[in-house]
Image (cartoon, coloured by chain):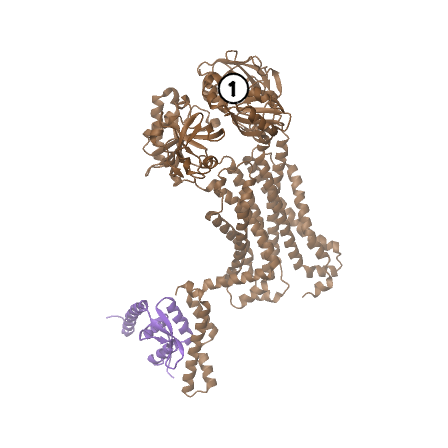
Chain colours: A purple, B brown
Amino acid sequence: MTEKSDLPQGTLDLLILKVVALGPVHGYAIAQRLQQVSRDVVQVPQGSLYPALHRLENRGLLAADWKDTDTGREAKFYRLTRKGRAQLETEAASWDRLAAAVGLILKMSEGGTR
Amino acid sequence: MNWLQRLWRRRQMEEQLEKELRFHLDQYESELIANGHDPEEARRQAALALGGPEQVKEYCRDARGTRWLEDLLQDIRFALRMLRKNRAFAAVALLTLALGTGATTVMFTVVNGVLLKPLPYPEPNNLVTVRGHTETWNTKIFGEQNVAYPDFLDCKRDSRSLEMAGTLYDGGTVSEPGPPEYVDLREISSGLFSVLRVNLAHGRAFMPGEDLPGGAPVMILGYSFWQRHFAGRPEALGTSVVLDQKRYTVVGIAPADFRLDGIEPDVYTPIGQNTAAYLQNRSAHPIGVVARLRPGATLANAQAELGLIGRHLAEEYADTNAGRTFLVQPLRPEVGDVRSTLWLLLGAVSLVLLIACVNVASLLLARAVSRERELSMRAALGASRSRLVRQCLTESAVLALSGGLLGLLLADVGVRPFIAFWPGSLPRAQEVHLDWRVMLFAISVSLLSGLLFGLAPALRSPARGLEQALRAGARSVAGTSRRLHSAFVISEIALAIVLLVAAGMLGRTLLMLSSLDPGVNVNNVLVTRMALSPATLADPGRIRPAWQDVLSRASRVPGVQSVALVDTFPMREGNNQIGYSTSADIPPENQQPMTLATSVTPDYLNVMGIPLRRGRFFDDQDRIGNQLVVVIDDVLSKQAFGTQDPVGRRLWIPGTSSPFSSDSKAPDPVLVVGVVGHVRHWGLAGDDQAQVRAQLYYNFAQVPDPLLPRWSQLMSVAVRTSVAPLSVVESLRQQVRGAAGDQVLYEVRTMEQLASGTLARQRFLLLLFGIFAGLALLLACIGIYGVLAYLTGQRVPEIGVRMALGARPADVMWLVFRQSLGMIFGGIAVGIVAALAAGRGLQHLVEGMLPTEPSTLAITVPVLVVAALLASFVPARRASRVDPMTALRQD
């Protein structure tokens, strides 16, 4: 069993936006996709997925429609709104900057700067 | 979807949430099964991965952002359900609140209409008035005056900051169309309607060219007059109306409800066409000024500018305008002494509302204590303290708002009867109706009172230890609530005492005032104003014979004993205040002593039943050309001559106010020929505090010819009858119509009506305070009953123990009474202090008011004690009948 990490605060929204950006998708599929893509490293508690989806929908970053799935069942499909896309871009960019900065700091050799 | 829609589709949202989560679980489950899990195990794992479904749903609901509103709606639904369930509680609380807010709202509706609403003209804030002020005058008595017409014209011409118009009160007889009628005439500047920004209902306003001597005679009709005489037909425009023998062409109709100084005039004519001498005189001040600030001008600009104009005029016309300046003041509705009455009543009625609030608070508190278990259960299930407080406040707000809405309905029904009930006519009564201000007031008052009575129960609700409350079970311990309850009862009783004492003071005052001797015999006296024929008035030589004719004809009317003419009769119906001097060396105007002067005919003393103390009253020898004589009253006799006999002494009356001569420097002396009793001219209540009480009478026959037409416009006919005074009115009217049939009587009243009218304010206040005090007493009794019933109910087990240990029913009753007596006397102590303070306030506001006396307290306090003890009797008796066995077994 691989070691799992908790998600850093606030990143769940970003991940959801990214997954939804790939095309309309329902809640269960989002959970699956997150699990697969992160190779089971990231632990997304399913219980907090739905409140997050509803919160994003409430903020107008996501929109939702009820559509039939391949198996013919009706499910709630989320898609990205224009506002959501903009939000995704800014958040992704700031995540990159943050990650790069954290990476730099971590690569710093012991003994301070030379 | 905005939050409102989300709220609206709550059920749909709930279904979708359920469906979405179901879908998730099903998908996961089938995937696990496909991976080889046993179906039972798969369902378990799927459910485990998602977490508690209700919890997830709750988080999702939170994420919707409409949580607070949903909670609020839930609380409101719950509150309504609670009210429906406790019908008795709801009925008592709602009725109490409805009465409290209803009465307060009625009072506020009147205050709003009469005192707070701006004048009913467009942009009322730019409207001002200009008043005249003379330094050397006794402004304490006269106040500020109107303006002389020539001064007005100069100000109007020179002012850059004000757009001005003048008005002049007048009256006249309209003899065509229809039967002769005395009308209220207002002479106005051509610009009046445009200054006020009021459009005429029909036709046009006066042109500037018509506002000049010799202009075409034109007239504007008042709306009511037009309705009365022309049945509202627009063809009235262009027809002619004969006023005081002059034919006018109607050019306009004033809009409905258009009033000047609170009165709707019958007809308007251009002031500039009036060529009367006193309008050309700068020392007569008859013109009321209405002005509007021009765009950009401020009150201060206007004041500075008119001050400058005033100084120029004072230099130019030193003999008339020395020391005279002009004051620019905001134009305000004229409401007189109604202001203090209204605020007084609003204050009194808010005390009633306060009692109602306290009552409901103690009811709610009693309920909160018995609901302690429910609230503790909620807390145990995870409700936070703030959430519980919010719930309690929502409940009281629902109660308060429902009570407030009921109160608003009551007010809507009650305000018209209240105004009809007002003694005399309420100024601006037409402005009084429910509007957005009143709604806002009623809603804020009820919400505020909801907060007031809801806060105490709400704050205490979750305050106690959770498990302690749960464990206490049905037997709640009422320690803190008992103190709070006592405080409620004490404040209720204190408030009731204030109202009771106020009512008692008013009652005593009224008794004292109505037993006062008015100085005249008011029984069987009719007084009516009278207008001579316009033709007679136009010819001064015919005036004296015409009045003589009126007197002799009136005395022939069956039932008439004696008849006299008088210009200002007692009970506040007009007054003429003049300065006098006891020596030929006349002091400056503002240092002269003052007296009321009344012009009468010789029979006046008989008609009014005024006693003659010394000397004689007038006779037919007192004519023009003979010695000028006056008769004075006790008060003037004492004021002018001290203890000496005034008969045969002389007085000098300076020209500016003299009815005898116009020589202000050296007036002829007048001879005092008699002394009569003092008459309460200012009304039964007001006379003692009046500034000028002394009275002087002079014979109408000695009024010089030049003044005669003016005086004749002021005269009234006073008649003593041997039958009911109002029964002679018709024959009197017929007798004095004159040859042309155009002499009319108007404002016909009896002295009895006038005398009781002067006490109307006190009587009205007494009645309302009586009602409020009764209401307060009732509410306080309900409150005492409720609190005691509740507290005794809490003590049933204790009482059971006492009785089991041998206490007799009388002991138990005493136990309850002791508790109630403690609260009652606490309330009385607080109440008496407050009542003494309130009594002093009342003395300032109501004329003739007697101070609070021990006797007032001695009468009112026992009333309250008895009522309060009666209210505690039922709970006490119930307590004494507690069966010890059942009481002890209760838990």
- Look at the picture and state if B145 lies above or below B836: above
Q: Looking at the image, how many numbered discs can be counted on the residues? A: 1
Question: Which of B722 and A17 lies nearest the eye of the viewer?
Answer: B722
- Residue type at mark 1 is Ala
**Which quadrant of the structure image shows residue B633?**
top right
Q: Position of residue B51 (x, y in %)?
A: 45, 76
Could you say which is closer to the camera, residue B590 or residue B467? B590
Subunit that carries the residue with mark 1: B
> Quarter of the image containing the C terminus of chain B?
bottom right
Q: Position of residue B298 (x, y in %)?
A: 35, 37
Q: Which residue is mark 1?
A: B546
Mark 1 element type: helix
Pick out the residue farthest to the left.
A114
Q: Which is nearer the eye, B540 or B236? A: B236
In this view, which residue lies farthest toward the top?
A: B626
Residue B680 visible within the image: no
Classify residue B554 as left or right of residue B869.
left
Identity of the residue furthest to the bottom in this view? B36
Residue B734 visible:
yes
In the image, residue B515 lies at what x, y percent?
64, 30
Q: Where, by quadrant of the figure, is residue B78 drawn?
A: bottom right
**Is residue B550 depicted above or below B390 in this figure?**
above
Quadrant of the image for the N terminus of chain B? bottom left
Q: Nearer the viewer, residue B778 or A49?
A: B778
- Neighbours of disc 1 within 10 Å: few (<14), some (14-19), many (20+): some
- Image x and y of residue B186, in percent: 43, 30
